[in-house]
Amino acid sequence: MNQHQDFASRRAWMVENQILGRGITAAPVVTAMRRVPREKFVSPSLIDEAYDDGPLPIGFGQTISQPYIVALMVDAMDLTGGEVVLDIGTGSGYAAAVIASIAGRVFSIERVPELAESAAQTLATEGYDHVVVRCGDGTLGWPEQAPFDGICVAAGAPVVPEALKQQLRVGGHMVIPVGSAHTVQRLRRITRLSETEFRDESLGDVRFVPLLGEQGWS
């Protein structure tokens, strides 16, 4: 078995055990998790751990999230295809690639310049040409591209940033961890019901790096 086949086998195992095995069955999400080569988005020194059931460091104090958590967050946005999505905390670009396997366009913001540049390069190399990455303050969103059908935030906020709520399309979902900067947070799904009304649901406990920025942690 060559390395490509080996990673394909590991990816299939990951989907079967970590994704389907935990109850995520939405076809677009499962297909995306089967398609995206996670090994391309981890550090070369950790490539053999690409499909492990946990997060991995990617440098600069940041991580690539556990595969199940990525699937859970994408699943919670209820994407069916063709949507415009805002991805906050690009990191290595893995979650953006999973989202882009379903959505029509993905706008991704990363505050660490080196990670933004590296992720943009990896995404382009892997053919995700409908993902745009920029370096900036994710708590302020990307107003000129709003409104978004979905917003996915891969860092823990003290409260839900108002700027992101206002950039969510009516009927759209934002998935964001909220709580302490250094302990467990609650993963929340914010659904915009109207111009002024939002529904807030809890999806369980998670642990993310803090969301830094004007409307996040200082």
Image: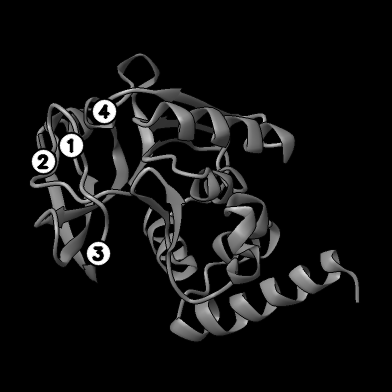
Which residue position is annotated with label 3? Answer: 207
First in sequence: mark 1 vs mark 3: 1
Secondary structure type for disc 3 = loop
Give yes or no for contact between labels 1 and 2 (Cβ–Cβ under 8 Å): yes
Secondary structure type for disc 4 = loop
Q: Which amino acid does the dot numbered 3 rest on?
A: Arg
| Distance of label 1 from label 2 (alpha carbons) | 5 Å
Q: Compared with residue 145, is residue 84 higher up or lower down, i.e. above or below?
A: below
Q: Which amino acid does the dot numbered 1 rest on?
A: Ser
Q: Quadrant of the N terminus?
A: bottom right
First in sequence: mark 2 vs mark 3: 2
State the image coordinates of residue 71 (x, y, percent, origin top left). 47, 63
Q: Compared with residue 168, is residue 142 higher up or lower down, i.e. above or below?
A: above
First in sequence: mark 3 vs mark 4: 4
In terms of image quadrants, where is residue 100?
top right
| Distance of label 2 from label 3 (alpha carbons) | 28 Å
Q: Residue furthest top?
A: 144
| Distance of label 3 from label 4 (alpha carbons) | 25 Å
**Comparing marks 2 and 3, which lies closer to the viewer?**
3
In this image, 62 relative to 5: left or right? left
Which disc number belongs to residue 167? 4
Which disc number belongs to residue 197? 2
State the image coordinates of residue 129 (x, y, percent, origin top left). 67, 29
